Image (cartoon, coloured by chain):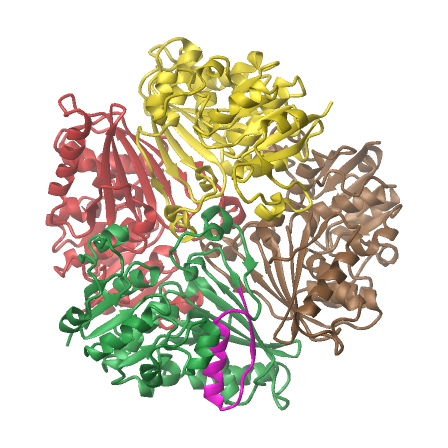
Chain colours: A yellow, B red, C green, D brown
Amino acid sequence: MSIRVAIVGPTGYTALWLVKLLARHPEARVTYLASQREQLPHIAEEFPELLGICDLTCRSIDAAAIARECDAAFIRLPHVAAMQYVPVLLEAGVRVIDLSADYRLSDPRKYESVYGHAHTDTANLANAVYGLPEFNAAKLPGARLVANPGCYPTAAALAIGPLLAKKLVKPTGIVINACSGITGAGRTAKPHLHFPEMNEAFMCYGAGTHRHQPEIEQTLTGLIGEEVRTLFVPHLLPVDRGIHETIYMEPADDLLPGAGAEDALYDVYEAAYANEPFIRIRLGFPNVKHVRDTNYCDLAVRVAGGKVIVFSVIDNMIKGASGQAIQNMNLMFEMEETAGLK
Amino acid sequence: MSIRVAIVGPTGYTALWLVKLLARHPEARVTYLASQREQLPHIAEEFPELLGICDLTCRSIDAAAIARECDAAFIRLPHVAAMQYVPVLLEAGVRVIDLSADYRLSDPRKYESVYGHAHTDTANLANAVYGLPEFNAAKLPGARLVANPGCYPTAAALAIGPLLAKKLVKPTGIVINACSGITGAGRTAKPHLHFPEMNEAFMCYGAGTHRHQPEIEQTLTGLIGEEVRTLFVPHLLPVDRGIHETIYMEPADDLLPGAGAEDALYDVYEAAYANEPFIRIRLGFPNVKHVRDTNYCDLAVRVAGGKVIVFSVIDNMIKGASGQAIQNMNLMFEMEETAGLK
Amino acid sequence: MSIRVAIVGPTGYTALWLVKLLARHPEARVTYLASQREQLPHIAEEFPELLGICDLTCRSIDAAAIARECDAAFIRLPHVAAMQYVPVLLEAGVRVIDLSADYRLSDPRKYESVYGHAHTDTANLANAVYGLPEFNAAKLPGARLVANPGCYPTAAALAIGPLLAKKLVKPTGIVINACSGITGAGRTAKPHLHFPEMNEAFMCYGAGTHRHQPEIEQTLTGLIGEEVRTLFVPHLLPVDRGIHETIYMEPADDLLPGAGAEDALYDVYEAAYANEPFIRIRLGFPNVKHVRDTNYCDLAVRVAGGKVIVFSVIDNMIKGASGQAIQNMNLMFEMEETAGLK
Amino acid sequence: MSIRVAIVGPTGYTALWLVKLLARHPEARVTYLASQREQLPHIAEEFPELLGICDLTCRSIDAAAIARECDAAFIRLPHVAAMQYVPVLLEAGVRVIDLSADYRLSDPRKYESVYGHAHTDTANLANAVYGLPEFNAAKLPGARLVANPGCYPTAAALAIGPLLAKKLVKPTGIVINACSGITGAGRTAKPHLHFPEMNEAFMCYGAGTHRHQPEIEQTLTGLIGEEVRTLFVPHLLPVDRGIHETIYMEPADDLLPGAGAEDALYDVYEAAYANEPFIRIRLGFPNVKHVRDTNYCDLAVRVAGGKVIVFSVIDNMIKGASGQAIQNMNLMFEMEETAGLK
């Protein structure tokens, strides 16, 4: 089998990584690059590093042509734009992995309050699978529409979920101190992302206001059936790639104190992810450099100062976006989960 | 007046910055570089950037000579080594600003438990002034021995102190999520600080175990006369310079909710530091890049998710070490507080 | 004496450094920030790092007001725009240091061919002094209009000049392999200067086509009265600051071979710059890091492979722009050459 | 077929990349990690990023065991050490790709003069194939000992070879201005490679003295049967990965002038490398970032200032070391040349 793949919105960093990863995939190949631009470049003009790797010229977004030529489409359009194209592609018979935010929040009212637009495709929204494979693997085979999670929510949910599920930490008062490499801010040049502004710099850019906070809370609330409350505080890190989250949680009242607790929590993670190919539980502190260019999420846990502290790192481009999207595709099409990703 | 200054331990980054800053000081000049090394280099061989800036060759640590030729000495030796030399220099009549950890913790038992060595100079320890000028300015004029604070404790105490003093936050449950540029780890080449290991990297290196945590707690406990408890979690940031702390505190029960609270807290900082030349209260998020090469501490405050969040940034080499040491010298010798620092 | 200074075009990096350096100058102070923008910001809104350092709000470019309130003006406008304002300010009695390219090339036809615009102020062009103080110090006292050199030409001319003047190298076949930190490309965000594009990147961006090549050739030709030909090849270096030039020259036929030649050339530099406060001749290889934030130009020379190789480094923002502009101001107004710069 | 591979000297960066690349290779697998160390670590303790990727513990260097368990060995020992082990492994029947310098220079007297040690394995030296596949592909199938080229020589020879072979440039007066990312200096922490020393730094570290210069000259001289002379000048670039060479050559007397020449030279490269899977000829300037993590060598050519200028970039870890070593293994064992490398 070889899945034929379209990328809709092929000129951002996420698309670049989809192309690079799919070039190595044994059972999928990119056959259609669909762009909203008027001028449709060869992809290697847009990304010089793709010279010799992908020999496609961008085409316009023609759902009928995509349906004829592709089995699946990755959507990498801004939110709102994505939900214009998703129903058309689904209708035409293409299975969709949407990397925008449009199908991540299951409640359309929540979507509207967070993103400031009414949801225009609530029918498909109701059937979208939230594509965090470690939590939702059962729903992915055969799924027609998968919402690929946000980068920060991926790292956060994988870190917090196992302890909440075992009631080892309290569902409120969770603080997520997060840092992201600059590719997470996208490919558009902006004054505050100009090299001399970000190089040798470090700063917070929000406290409790980021759109990923409700996504994290939805996932965790869904997991335990009880309302989960977090405070999400993102910072910009002067590196290309990587998300690092230091997560502070209140231990449940009956958690063992001291080093015993730490061992017990480590074991919980080991058990929870024993069969997951992309989760690594570490004794040492995770480092964004050690997951670079991989689909891994590295986790470690500490108990100190009356808190449970979990460290979670991913590559924002891979497990935080394109790698996870391919992991989802693999499961949707019942291929090997790790195909093209190891 | 022109203060003649010795630097004892002149081959670390802190000493480099002392030399550079003092080269601009209108009323002080470096006259003696005292080293423990066997081979005594010209300082511009050790630091090529000092060619043309400082024309001194290192000499051995001769207290009598230092006393003859200097009014003050900056000690930049490792802890334990520092307290061998400090009493000798004081005895010889030299006033001392010690940048090691040896005189920071006022309780010698605490010192021993944190640093693993008995304190061998308890007599002078009892008289050492903790040189955080914004809190202890009254004790500095005429002081003979000043313990220059640690870099992380400087940023933390300046950020937390004003709210604790006004009882606007609780003295326990304080989480200090800290990041430091790599010069903070010193000048000695180590495998984990090799360029290809730290470049494009980011990781935690401790949770509740750093020696600066008790120093922070001592300062804040001393400030309010009530025990303060913190959880200090440091991370290494792939930049040369700068400390960034994101500090999470529980609001006092009667703190105003919402934006009103934020304004009120901002006003508390403005009032607390109205006369301080090196503290800037910001509406936007502080950035380590904006304090680089300066003696400023930039602060901002937010209220979100049921927490009070304070952001504090300094240059670890300047306000976190050499700049603050000069600020202390200025006050000890009753010079302009900002001399050589603006 | 205290010179009152205007900065015309205060929102670029060069202006930032003028403000920072002048804040320390003992005999000059910035009194007027003149901007072409419609919205005129407080300078600390534009540059958060200037909070507490400069408390001026930008004003419009009003020559009469500038003349009333200032003795000198630094012009930091794009070329063509600069030569609109310079004659008006000169006419109003303000002495001008122009940091644009408009008065650097003395031949207006050459200017037109390089910059693509006719020169509209040839009268003042004829009287402009090219402000490379190490070569032109005699013309600066009393000068009314100084053209501040380009960054690359400063490093190149200081490196090549002494050997050409002594006829130790040939005036043709000179290759200047140059690298510049990203601040050299200005403050405007552009796609190729977006952090993730430049971080961990390195590439050439021209070979024989850069506008600084004719400026270099003019300076050197003027120095020796014989036509000098260079090939200038600039590269972008993923650092904030610094220019590094590796310059390859053909030795004159009678240059001593081997190590003897190297020593002889070293002595030529030592002699040429014996009285220059901002030139350092090094035995080791110069490093951009060692001149950062200084007005130094560091030079070293080697003889190998049949070539004379000279290494020249400066901080593009300081000796390459704002520092040299202040050095020029100091000499124009007959102040200490190093005032505000050490 | 599945080649069983040993890595001798598994704790350097080159070995890390061998492991990572071979983990993806369809027809080879690492089965033996042979180390000189006394303490033999699990490879994921040594390189945390290999957790889950390679589950081998290092063993001692036992030639008999390696011969039993492996078909090929990559040697990543320092020079001199390598030639102790290579004959033993060859004797035991293992085919060897040596990444040290010991078998690169075919003349043992040249080896001794460059590396300061007598060559102790001249018998095998005489039969070693210099593993630059683009030049020596015919000799690789069946080869028992391959000397993997140096990183700089790979980039240089691929850039210069085609023009020399066509006599379009002169064989003398070639200047190679080279820059390398810091992984090129190895994994051992050294003072000048400490993060705060190299970050934001840039400097030359030799002019005509690097051991790769004779290797470059040997390759090119061998190619054209006429003595080739170069001047090689390496610089350290503050990035992890990548070599960038700007190479200046004298055009042959009959080379067409101007843009016509440039097109003609471009065509020469296109023709020379038409069938090479890892060479890309670019119209724009090559960028180290665009070859990162790939086995590509990107080339571009310009004619300016009377010189032919060629730009050559590779990833020093991949085409400059481990990737090329695998390319050599693929050809030695008559597998697909690109296996595991695309």
For image coordinates 52% across by 27% down, the residue present is A297
D119, A296: nearer the viewer = A296
- Determine if the magenta segment contains residue B142: no
Is C218 part of what is drawn in magenta?
A: yes
Residue D219 is situated, as x and y percent measured from the top left of the image, at 78, 63
Q: Is residue D58 left or right of residue B81?
A: right
Q: Residue, x 33% and y 42% (percent of image)?
A: B244
> Within the image, what quadrant is residue D273 found in?
bottom right
Q: Is residue C26 visible?
A: no
Image quarter (top left, top right, bottom left or bottom right) of the C terminus of chain D: top right
Residue A301 image-quadrant placement = top left
Q: Residue at x 79, y 47 (%)?
A: D328
Tell me: C75 left or right of B276. Answer: right
Image x and y of residue D231, in percent: 66, 71
Which residue occupies the foreground of this view, A335 or D270?
Answer: D270
Q: How many marks?
A: 0
Q: Position of residue B178 (x, y in %)?
A: 34, 37
Residue C64 lies, with reference to residue B140, above or below; the image says below
Q: Quadrant of the N terminus of chain D?
A: top right
Q: Is residue C10 above or below residue B233?
A: below
Q: Position of residue C56 (x, y in %)?
A: 18, 58
Q: State the extent of the magenta-drawn residues as a range.
A: C209-234
Is residue B17 positioned above or below B57 on the image? above
Q: Is residue D257 above or below residue A9?
A: below
